[in-house]
Image (cartoon, rainbow, N blue to C red):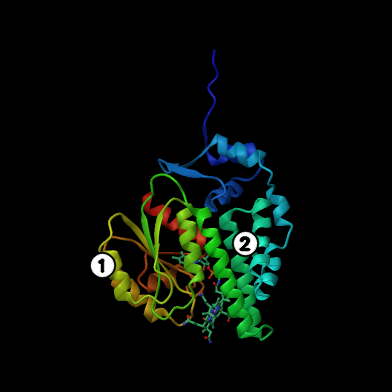
Amino acid sequence: MVGVVATTMTLQEAADQLGTHYMTVYRYVRLGRLPARKVAGVWEVDAADVAALQNGPEQPARSRSVDWSGRLEGRLVAGDEAGAWGVVEAALASGTAPGEIYTDLVAPALTSLGAKWHEGTITVAQEHLATSVALRLIGRMGPRFARRGRSKGLVVVTTAPGERHAIPSLMVSDLLRGAGFQVIDLGADVPEDAVAETIAGLDGLVAVCISSTRLGADRAVRRSVRAIREAAPNVPIFVGGAAIADAAHAADLGADGWAQDGPGAVDLVLGVLA
Ligand code: B12
């Protein structure tokens, strides 16, 4: 009798093979480290991809022991793009997934720099310099989130008028691309009429994500939500970012959902397809 080798696995089967917890494998999926798709509402991965993860040179435990975000922060504040990219490359080489570069390196480094700017231990110029290097790194990371094959659908990522923080929306956009969506990222400080006009003409729009970082921008976010709703009444609108406290806050702004972080934004949009 010829044995049949399974070519696909559930996340639990993958976790058993990798000798790790289900949630660890789920995290690999969310961050693009393990390609996966949902079939009848259940995650499915290719056995070959699980084997590649298992046999690859990278061991997650090794990368976790290094303070990558601290190293990156040092290079960002020094305005050292080559050095900062070197940190990113070293983290990638030791098994950090592209999505984790954003969530575990760039975002914490920027948060820490923001706190130092607030305390007055770094200057405004240093914070701007660090941000400009971070933007360059994100530009270099972009192609790593490209996915071949049919798109899962189109997502518009935007910010409300007056919002100058563009990095969170860039990161969310790349994470969505990594999950197989086509993304139009309108960037910072988008007039609500402009986003409404963009959305009105789109086919296959799955969701709109609004990123809000600056506290005190509720009125502007609410206006954007209203304009988007009028332009595309049946399309879910998700809000997130540091200025949105929780799901209740998001609901108060008129949105259909909220998540704490970029991988959570991906889950929200995937949930629309389920
Ligand atoms: C870089 C930066 C700037 C740059 C932005 C440049 C650019 N091109 O983006 C500049 C210099 C322009 C700037 C300006 C200002 N900034 Co500023 N800035 C920052 C800094 C250092 C980093 C921001 C960032 O990119 N973070 C990294 C992102 C990736 O992290 P994140 O927010 O956690 O994003 C994740 C989630 O939120 C989630 N997410 C994001 N969007 C969405 C959307 C959806 C739908 C979902 C589900 C999830 C989701 O996914 C992301 C990835 O996991 C922060 C410090 C900090 N704590 O973040 C201060 C910070 C945000 N800034 C702050 C302030 C005060 C300002 C200014 C008011 C300063 C001033 N006096 O002029 C102005 C405001 C300008 C404006 N009108 O918006 C404060 C905000 C405080 C507050 N209570 O509002 C912070 C926190 C600094 C501090 N510690 O005080 N800033």
Viewer-proximal residue among 245 and 39: 39
| Residue that badge 1 annotates | 231
Please say if 42 is above or below 260: above
Quarter of the image with the N terminus is: top right
Q: Amino acid at mark 2?
A: Asp
Q: Name which residue lies at 65% across and 50% down.
A: 95
Pointer 2: residues within 10 angstroms few (<14), some, or many (20+)? some
Locate residue 90, reporting x and y percent. Answer: 68, 56
Q: Which residue reaches farthest front?
A: 82
**Are dots 2 and 1 in contact, CB under 8 Å?**
no
Locate residue 31, reporting x and y percent. Answer: 55, 53
| Residue that badge 2 annotates | 104
Mark 2 within 8 Å of ligand 1, using the beta carbon: no
* Element type where label 2 sits in the image: helix
Q: Is residue 249 left or right of residue 124?
A: left
* Element type where label 1 sits in the image: helix
Instruction: Report how far apart the C-alphas of labels 2 and 1 lie in the structure.
Output: 36 Å
